[in-house]
Amino acid sequence: MILLATLLVLAVAAVGWWLARKRAREIELRSSGHHDRLHSRPVYHGLYVAIWTGVPALLLLLLWVAIQGPLLDALLLASLPQDVVQGLDENARAVLLNEIKTRAAGNPLPGEPAPYVAEAVRRLLRWRAIANMAALALSLAVALAGMAFAWRRLSPTFRARRAVERAFTWLMLVCASIAILTTVGIVLSLIFETMRFFTMVPLTEFVFGLRWEPQIAIRPDQVASSGAFGMIPVFAGTLLISAIALGFAVPVGLLSAIYLVEYASSRFRAFAKPLLEFLAGIPTVVYGFFAILTVAPAIKHFGDALGIPTAPNSALAAGLVMGIMLIPFISSLSDDALAAVPNALREGSIGLGATRAETIRYVLLPAALPGIMAGVLLAASRAIGETMIVVMAAGIIATLTLNPFEAVTTVTVQIVTLLIGDTEFDNPKTLAAFALGFVLFLITLALNMLSMHIVRKYREQYD
Amino acid sequence: MTDRTHNRAHEARDRAEKQGASEGGAAGPNGRIDWHSPQMLARLRRRHAANRRMKFIGLAAIVLAAGLLSILVGSLLKSGLPAFRQTFITLEFDLKPELVKPQNMRRGNWRKIVKEGLLRALPEDMRKNRKLRRKVLKIVSRSAPYALRDHVMENPHLVGRIIPFDVLASDPYDQFNKGLIPEYIVRGERKRPNPKLGGPEVVRAFRVLKEQKRVHLPFNWGLFFNADSRLPEAAGLAGAIVGSFLTLLVTFLISFPTGILAAIYLEEFAPKNRFTDFVEININNLAAVPSVVFGLLGLSLFIGFFGVPRSTPLVGGMVLSLMTLPTIIIATRAALKAVPPSLREAALGVGASHHQMVFHHVLPVAMPGILTGAIIGMAQALGETAPLLLVGMNAFIPDISNMGLTEPATALPTQIYSWADSPERGFVSRTAAAILVLLGFLLAMNALAIWLRQRYSTKW
């Protein structure tokens, strides 16, 4: 119904556009001299009317969609018999409303509905029909009113183009603000759920606790029913895997960038660059599968051959595969940093008799260092936030260890395992995921900011 | 050249000289360096050797990266390619009315029909073997009775006849037929029959079927056109492909117009003030926020607060559009920047307004670059997994007739994740095949982007 209303409004707006343009053309044809010439082209008159027809009505529909659900819920609750609603807490009310809605949608539920539920289902369906009709009628009325208002303003001297352009500027501003709204949304939703988490688990336990056992009791008398929410082992695991990944990826990526920029022939470059770009475009779920299919068994073989007890999902396997993922990232950022060093430096150094290697060591690397550092920081931020590789290849149980042959868990693994298949936001288990996510967000934000700061502060201004 | 660069070059030379001087004997009597003395020649050799070492290490790093890439692709191809073919067995089935139950075929004993169909094809002595009779169904997929039932329900006139029909082989026999699992497992001295194959007599029966040329290995269209299933041999990607398409559709419809308008505003209209600086920092930061955090946002804001239905392409597409937005904005801004000022000035010079200049003249010229960025953003969104997992887009979809924007769905990467989690051996192969399909899509999208860039790029 809302969809129909939207389409109708759009159709009316299109008609308004067509009529107004036609009328503006007529005015244009009738004009005789300078004094009654059209200020704006006819198409702007059309757009002006279409905007006034469409935008207010569509905004109304959007508002309607946003408030219809909660409003009907409230009305429905108020209409239920007092003695039924009285003794129910918030959750039980939600369950009751859900039952009514499910039955109203025609989905079968076990058991016969209570008489007051059946009554409420009928009422809900009737109200929905009324609300839909009202939305349709009201939006059409608003659309026509907007059209009439805009129509009356059409005249040779009317500056339709200015009005349309102003509307477009506003639209663009709104679009640009979505970036801010997204950040605000992320921060607010993370903070909100994290605050709720800290009402259940003390902050000090979360920050300093050495045990992470996020199970919750199904029965109150269960063994180990409390659970422990200390983030240290989870973060230690994240750091261990990220350190392995960076320790592997930074040298390999940097050296291959050096070779590509300084030694490689242009033909080799033309061949190797797309290869690295292809590596960079592979989705991480593919790397995760590669880790469990090939790398983890190989590491296990290797460890067992050395006589080290090796977990099948060792930190080393996850870290190495993450390192493979990061190679092209680091390589392309270092490549950019090295290529940005002006040729005069290179040629000056070589002209003075330095070899290529000496030029790289004493001239290029110092000049490109800020860019390379920024790249490494961005890579670290990606390693810490990387999810699928570790979800598939790292462990679930939080162990506080530095041994790369053992299984450790990471922040992202915990977030995903805690939230898969679970949407109740009322227990510390799911809320813990948001607390972890908040810390993750802060860390990656800090790394990104630091990286941007380094680039801005230490960038050499050549020429 | 600035002083600073000058100093750098000096420093390098000084250091090189100091090294030489400290070795002694290189400086002649009048303080000049004798470049041809043995010491200096040896030093030169060392320096060149160091240079060669550096070059070699760099090349080794690239070879290592390329080697790892080829191991990655190689292992995926090795385990994925066999899944592009599927073992079928052609058998004749006797559709006796007492087993089919023509009044209500869903109640028919299709298992028995399939079993008799198998036994009909075998020689007398095998047909009598009670051990084999008990286990012969291991050869065909557990989905075979349902496939036969559906076929007969569509063609009811077949009841009472004996019809030939291709049934899927079970996963172990599919693997066995492709030579992926052995008939015997050898551990040290002991050699025992592979338990997955159900015993030597079943393997013998399969061999007989194979000698009768009843076993085929055609291209596996089911991989693309079947819905998901708990049985590896019957599972396909249709649900995931449709789900990914719907999700990307939502992503594109939201992020493409929004991203372009935002970029135009920031590049062409925004006054230089604190607000626009803030927006810019925000966009750069969003591009680096971990994807799982976007999943958390989708879960708590879109699903929890706005009540968008969980597990649907709608909510998945909304989350992904927020992630693609920075990519599209950054690409669009770069494309707008590349349009030469002469074009803008010419448009303004003949009386276009600022808006007309941007929308009528700059934007069309920048469009190839924008489209390239958008396609690359879409390719990233297609491979994104973690946020989709958090908003529940890893639903099990055994039936694709009921897919829509607000119906539970799955997507290609989440399907890969679910299959990778399944214990059956056949799913390893399917997962690798699904990855190859996903990489194929990504390659196609990137190729399209490169083609667009080269076909329409203008040198100014």
Image: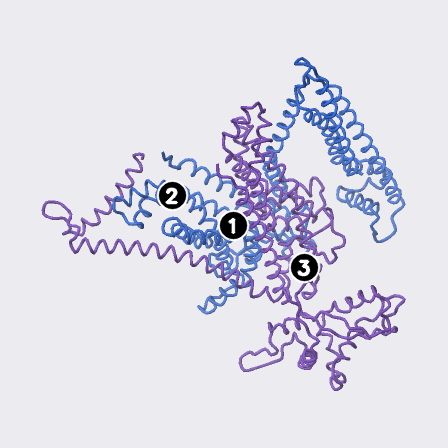
Chain colours: A blue, B purple
Q: Secondary structure under badge 1?
A: helix
Q: Please name whichever residue, A239 or B42, is drawn nearer the observer in this view of the structure.
A: B42
Q: Residues within 10 Å of mark 2 (few under 14, many from 20)?
A: some
Q: State whether residue A55 appears in this view.
A: yes
CB of mark 1 within 8 Å of CB of mark 3? no
Q: Position of residue A447 (x, y in %)?
A: 48, 42
Identity, as a three-letter code, of the amino acid under mark 1 = Phe
- Residue A235's tag is 1
Asked where in the image residue B62 lies, by quadrant, the reply is: bottom left
Label 3: state its secondary structure.
helix
Which x, y percent locates residue A311?
52, 63
Say which residue label 2 marks: A369
Q: Which residue is mark 3?
A: B224
Please give left or right for residue B321 compared with residue B10 in the image. Answer: right
Q: Amino acid at mark 3?
A: Phe
| Label 3 – label 2 distance at C-alpha | 49 Å
